[in-house]
Each structure stands twice: as structure tokens, then as C-alpha cells.
Amino acid sequence: MNLLYELAKERKAEVVSKYGGRNLARLLNISHPAVSKWRVIPPLRAYQIADMGDFALDYIRPDLKHNDIAPLPQGVDHQS
């Protein structure tokens, strides 16, 4: 798991490099200092970035399971 977390740190740098820190903050409607404080991309932000279409969710955060990040569609239960 630690290796996957280290990979997530590298992916954070890659994502920020692609979009630019200030632009990414603007796209996510958060402050630039918030983006600068990330060691890895937080789960909700990873989902939002993946939704932009340039990176897959499991690429951004390989250390997390998808159902830990993505919201469930309305009416779907977590226990399936």
C-alpha cells in the first residue's frame, strides 16, 4: 500500500503540472494554497479531476478503491 501511496504523490505532481496549480484550483473552485498543501490529491478532488476527462480515477489515486471515492448513483446501496 505504501508503494501505491508514493505513486499517488507522483501522480499529484503530474496532474498539477498538466493543469497548472492556479488553473486547477480555479477549475475545482478552491484556493491555490489548498492545492499547494496536497501531498496527494484528496479523494473527492480526484473524482472531480477524473470527471474532467484527462486522467482516469485509478490513475490519479491508485492507492484507493473506487467505491471509496466515487459517489454512488441515487438509489444504489453500498452493500452490494
Image: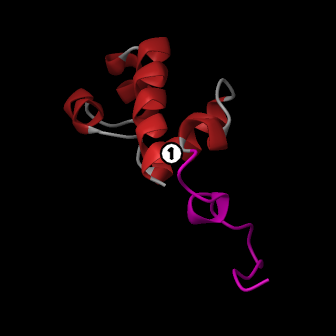
Q: Nearer the viewer, residue 31 or 16?
A: 16
As drawn, 74 above or below 16: below
Q: Main secondary structure of the magenta part?
A: loop
**Label 1 Cα neighbours within 10 Å, binned few <14 / some 14-19 / many ≥20:** few
Residue 70: % across, % down:
63, 58
Count the marks: how many? 1
Side (left or right) of 37 relative to 67: left
Residue 72 magenta-drawn?
Answer: yes
Which percent across, then down, holds residue 43? Answer: 48, 52
Is residue 15 shown above or below 80? above
Q: Under tag 1, what secondary structure?
A: helix
Tell me the magenta residue range: 62-80
Residue 7 falls left or right of residue 22: right
Which residue is pictured at 65% across the width and 65% down the height? 67
- In this picture, residue 58 sits left or right of residue 45: right
Q: Amino acid at mark 1?
A: Leu
The reply, left or right, for residue 4 in relation to residue 20 is right
User: Which residue is tagged 1?
Assistant: 4
